[in-house]
Image (tube, rainbow, N blue to C red):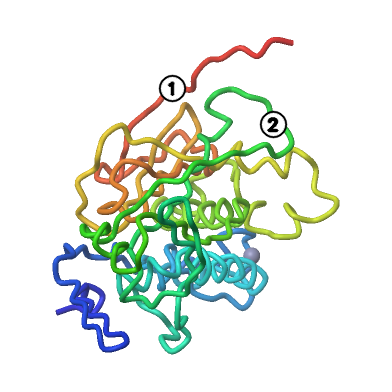
Amino acid sequence: MDSAHDWQGVVISAGVKLTTTHMPKFPYPCKLYPSLNQCAYCGSTKKLSTEHIIPFGFGGRLILPNASCEFHRIATSRVEDFILRKYLCALRSHLSLPSRNPKGRPEGYPLILRRDGRSWEMNVSLADHPGLVRFVMLDPAGRPSGRPRKPETYSFRLIDIYIFPDIAKRLARLGADSFEDAVVIKALDLARWLAKIGHCFAVAELGIDALEEMYVTHLIDYEAIDGETASDEVRDWNYWVGGYDRGRDIKAHELHELRFLRRGDDLSVIVHLLVPYCPRYAYEVIVGRLRAEVEIPLELDEGMMAYNSVQIAE
Ligand SMILES: [Zn+2]
């Protein structure tokens, strides 16, 4: 069996043996693309390293060799580090996603537990973790609605992902009936991470010349977007990156799914993470203006969608 498909996670902690064999098994998306031989973000040909379109630690085997310069390698790994180790840490452990540093997994996960109007903090082991993960869903991207670019005014909501079907029992064992996951969310980092996945996937699948104009490469560069001198327009990441409702529950074939969506001349990548656990809600990254002659592979085509022609009153 391909180790990438090994989902049979068995978690052992404090003498409690918890099998997770009831979890359905979903393969990771896997593909080795031909070497790009230039940085996917800036075109540099110096000191190139391999890009994992979805990080290795999140169950990604979409590999684009020689595709990131040193500057962009550091920029993307900084944001990935935050996402994987802070935001998605418990989830990754529950799903037995690979880790380059398994010993670095935390001893416990901080939770705020509640019962009868009382709440308390507790550090729980992985085996005791109720297996609910709050997934951050961003507002839809601004561009399709025709809104102007403006200073950052994003909002988001949380979608609950249940890893185990017996969450109530798990909470009762901890003496609680509900809980909060103490997750720190940096929406900008999440958006940057998604921008990287979307941009890199478009370049890998369609070639670096497929885009006449690239829209989100500035989001990858920390200083460009987060620096003091960044303009309001540049800071408005939610213009390009947002939540996307696929309109129905998608039948999961793989753990993550990436698709192309065309909006006029614009090309979006629908980044649908953890499809089996969050079957309807995904993200959209508007990656650039697509050259007219470029064809989208049929199996990756989510279709065509018109921009809402909202007129903005002067
Ligand atoms: Zn670069």
Identity of the residue drawn at 44% across and 57% down: 114
Task: Return the mark for residue 306.
Answer: 1
Q: Nearer the viewer, mark 1 or mark 2?
A: 2
CB atoms at circles 1 and 2 under 8 Å apart?
no
Q: Could you give the CA–CA distance between mark 1 and mark 2, rounded to whole angstroms?
A: 19 Å
Task: Return the mark for residue 149.
Answer: 2
Identity of the residue drawn at 72% across and 43% down: 234
Amino acid at the residue labelled 1: Ala
Image coordinates for residue 80, horizontal then vertical, percent = 54, 67
Q: Quadrant of residue 297?
A: top left
Image coordinates for residue 272, horizontal then vertical, percent = 36, 49
State which quarter of the image contains the C terminus.
top right
State which quarter of the image contains the N terminus.
bottom left
Q: Is residue 211 left or right of residue 45?
A: left
For ligand 1, the image quadrant comes to bottom right
Q: Earlier in the sequence, mark 1 or mark 2?
A: 2
Q: For the residue labelled by badge 2, is the local secondary structure a helix, a strand or a loop? A: loop
| Other residues around mark 2 within 10 Å, as few (<14) / some (14–19) / many (≥20) | some
- Mark 1 CB near ligand 1 (8 Å cut): no
Task: Return the mark for residue 33.
Answer: none
Farthest residue toward the right?
Answer: 229
Amino acid at the residue labelled 2: Arg
Give the camera-side residue of 172 and 150.
172
Identity of the residue drawn at 72% across and 44% down: 235
